[in-house]
Image (cartoon, coloured by chain):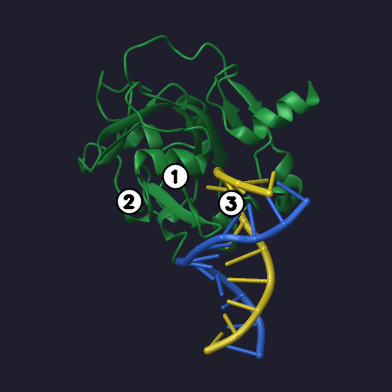
Chain colours: A green, B yellow, C blue
DNA sequence: AGCGGGATTAGC
DNA sequence: CTAATCCCGCTT
């Protein structure tokens, strides 16, 4: 789906099923304007969480205070604290009332980014994203401090898939190949990298 | 009010 | 391999 060059992705981009949007996030840029200035990275790894039936999704426990943003309109940020230590950044997809979301797991950092962006917790810490950004509108309609945009450059040459990480509790849903990544990227999250090396 | 657990990470 | 650390959701 087209977005103007250098422009924030429009609501319509997010207003589609999570499994459709997820591979299209690869190669796009996540940008945060914060106290440290503008920090950005190119998305190379994501995971789709498809809705209330998906036992790996927080939305499978229904509409609660934490998950309400997932059930809301697309194009907003869903950010939560995990293990009391790390933040995870998601984009909300699907139509209002449906609970699709996509976890951003790894970025290739822009040249001036101070720190690592391989891994969902690390990229939030390095870009300065935390729970105060939860529910923020990522589109140009809000013109907030956090957004996704398309930047000039070669397209992603190839998209690979694998099962999602760290959701073994989800039964049969754990096997679905709903992790999407750019194979060969140096910035993939650590756990899958170890797994890949271990298997090789 | 209390308790169990988590879409992770760093350090031994 | 495991501790860290806290919010949330569910039970009492």
The spot of residue A12 in percent (x, y) is: 34, 34
Q: Are marks 3 and 2 in contact (CB under 8 Å)?
A: no
What label does residue A89 carry, if any?
Answer: 1
Residue drawn at the location 30% of the way across and 41% of the way down: A138
**Residue that label 2 marks:** A133
Q: Of discs 3 and 1, which sits in the foreground?
A: 1
**Mark number, residue A154:** none
Q: Residue at x 69, y 30 (%)?
A: A194
Marks 1 and 2 in Cβ contact (< 8 Å): yes
Subunit ID for the residue under disc 1: A
Observer-nearest of B9 and A178: B9
Q: Earlier in the sequence, mark 1 or mark 2?
A: 1
Q: Quadrant of the C terminus of chain A?
A: top right
Regarding mark 3 in the picture, which secondary structure is present there?
loop
Chain bearing mark 3: A
Q: Position of residue A122 (x, y in %)?
A: 48, 40
Cβ–Cβ below 8 Å for labels 3 and 1?
A: no
On the image, the x and y values in percent for residue A80 come to 46, 55
Residue A161 vs A34, above or below: the answer is above
- Among numbered discs 3 and 1, the one appearing first in the sequence: 3
Is B4 left or right of A143, judged from the image as shown?
right
Asked which quadrant contains residue A25, the reply is: top left
Q: Quadrant of the N terminus of chain A?
A: top left
Q: Secondary structure at mark 1?
A: strand
Is disc 3 in the same subunit as disc 1? Answer: yes
Protein chain holding label 2: A
Whether residue A21 is visible to the viewer of this picture, yes or no, is yes
* Of A116 and A29, the residue lying toward us: A116
Q: Is there any visible trace of residue A64 in the rendered image? A: no
Q: Which residue is disc 3 drawn over?
A: A57
Measure the C-alpha gap from mark 3 to mark 1: 14 Å
Q: Which numbered disc flags the more N-terminal residue, 3 or 2?
A: 3
């Amino acid at each position: 789906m087209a977005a103007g060059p250098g422009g924030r992705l429009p609501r319509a981009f997010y207003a589609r099923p999570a499994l459709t949007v997820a591979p299209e996030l690869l190669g796009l840029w996540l940008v945060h304007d914060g106290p440290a200035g503008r920090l950005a990275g190119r998305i190379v790894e994501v995971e789709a969480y498809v809705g209330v039936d998906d036992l790996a999704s927080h939305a499978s426990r229904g509409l609660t205070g934490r998950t309400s943003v997932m059930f809301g309109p697309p194009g907003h940020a869903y950010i939560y604290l995990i293990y009391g230590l790390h933040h995870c950044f998601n984009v909300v997809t699907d139509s209002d009332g449906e609970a699709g979301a996509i976890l951003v797991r790894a970025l290739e950092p822009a040249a001036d980014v101070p720190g690592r962006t391989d891994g969902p917790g690390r990229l939030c810490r390095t870009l300065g994203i935390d729970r105060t950004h939860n529910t923020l509108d990522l589109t140009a309609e809000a013109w907030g401090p956090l957004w996704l945009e398309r930047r000039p450059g070669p397209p992603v040459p190839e998209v690979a898939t694998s099962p999602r990480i760290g959701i073994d509790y989800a039964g049969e849903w754990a096997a679905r190949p709903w992790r999407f990544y750019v194979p060969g990227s140096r910035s993939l999250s650590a756990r899958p990298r170890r797994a890949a090396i271990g298997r090789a």
